[in-house]
Image: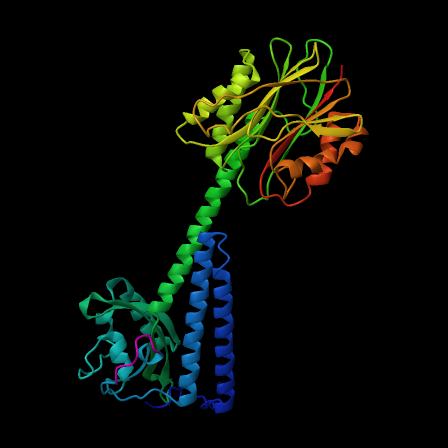
Amino acid sequence: MPSHLSADRPAAQPPGRGSVDALISQTRRLKVDVDAVRRDAAGEGSDPPRERWQRALYDLALHQLSDLDEHLAQLRDGPLPTAAPEPPAPSQGSLLSRVGSAEWNLLTDEARWSGELYQILGRDPAAPPLTLDELPSLVVDEDRPKLTAMVTNCLVDARPIDGEFRIARRGGDVRTVHMMGEPVLDTDGSAASMWAVLRDVSELRRSQRVVSETRDSLHHRQEAARSEHRLAVELQEAVLPPWRGSLRLPHRGPRTLDLASRHLPASAHTMIGGDWYDALELTDGETLLSVGDLTGQGVGVTSNMTMLLGAVRGMAMAGAQPGQLMAWLNQLLDATVQPALGSAVCCRYRPATRTLVWAQAGHPAPLLFRDGTGRALNAPDGVLLGATSGAVYGQAEETLQVGDLLLLHTDGLVPGHTGSAAANLLLGLAPRLAGNRTAEDCVRTVVEEFGASEREDNACVLAARVMS
């Protein structure tokens, strides 16, 4: 094939072999680096949809680098042959099977194709090459106007060709072809011929579609997660008491308890869990205090928490004592359509005798702070809610004094610690809590100590100081 240049500009000098070899070496080193990063990223295992999207991007990058490597190798080794004999069968996916060239002489109506172009277009190598008028017969109907416009602009307006179209090969195989070319001008400035390089980019476009689809899937999943998170937050905020500052109860007589609470959310990317806290003045003058936590995250768990909290309030209003209330909660959770496990502490405070009656279901015991020291209350028997049918829950009593501070919390309040380890760290705040005047000051002290760290789970804390 003659040099593909317009008659009015000089031929560019080919790059030196050494400089092309250097580019090939750089490309291959980059391929190794990208592949190493891809393998490292595959082991993270944190978010499967995001992993699929990242893996698709890595595969696409490696695919394009492989193409670049082969293009540079072809540039170094010389141009493709222009004769049309049947070429030797290349390995599947190699560059020689994906790039071909052609020239159409407009003066003689002669066409010349490289052997690779026959393979790309699915034509018999013994057949004559198609003319420009015949070429659209291979193109799918929707893309024929695009090819016609590209060729017309090239021949009439001397515009370079750079576009894609799909061809239908024998057997129904549809391939995507990228075509680049220019007109070769005669001495009078008219187009004498047109040359083009055609490349099969079907696999590349398939990789790009995979990247796009996985990115869209990840975007939709993130949008759904954000919507679910927002709904869970709204549902939680709708049913829990105000979670900042003191809790104001409609006291009928002297104020007996100073109450404050705080909800500590997990990291921003984590879904809202089933933690709750509650303080409610009952019809008999007693005060209900409760905290709890359902396993899991998301709207379903928050919905179950809402149901459970409503049941706690209703049964307490009806006069149920903490032990019996826990047993009924266990039956309720065991009968739900979506089984779940939960832990809880439920207390009834009797101001006339300063008596705290309480029960627990697999939950950290309340912490009692008095005169600069603290201790965990001795817990009565109680298994996790929903763990077994017909469970019986014990009940305990504790007499409080004016100035006592009672701290109820859900597991996860102290990041990285649970059970007795978390309780001991909280009890270590006793000297500082003794200097706090209000329940809100006490909650603020706890949050300052344990609320700034990254936490994997949501947590609640409820403070009650005996006023009279």
Q: Examine the rendered structure and indicate whether residue 212 appears above or below residue 284.
A: below
> Going by the image, does 134 lie left or right of 387?
left
Q: Nearer the viewer, residue 154 or 315?
A: 315
User: Which residue lies most toward the right here?
Assistant: 435
Can residue 383 be seen here?
A: yes
Which image quarter: residue 183? bottom left
Q: Residue at x 41, y 55 (%)?
A: 214
Q: Which residues are magenta?
A: 88-94
Give x and y (percent) for residue 269. Answer: 55, 45
The quadrant the C terminus occupies is: top right
In the image, residue 109 sits, relative to residue 176, either above or below, namely: below
Residue 363 position (above or below residue 61): above
Q: Is residue 52 magenta?
A: no
Magenta: main secondary structure equals loop
Q: Which quadrant of the rendered structure holds the N terminus?
A: bottom left
Q: Which residue corresponds to the image point at 53% horizontal and 37% vertical from the top-left?
A: 230
Tell me the residue at 72%/33% (across/down): 427
Residue 236, position as x, y percentages in the image: 55, 30
Q: Is residue 410 left or right of residue 208?
A: right
Colouring used for the render: rainbow
> 144 or 404, which is in the foreground?
404
Q: Picture coordinates of residue 387 (x, y %)? A: 46, 30
Query: Which quadrant of the structure image shows residue 128?
Result: bottom left
Q: Is residue 63 above or below residue 79?
A: above
Whether 92 is among the magenta residues is yes
Q: Considering depth in this image, is 123 or 303 the residue closer to the camera?
A: 303
Camera-side residue of 41 and 401:
401
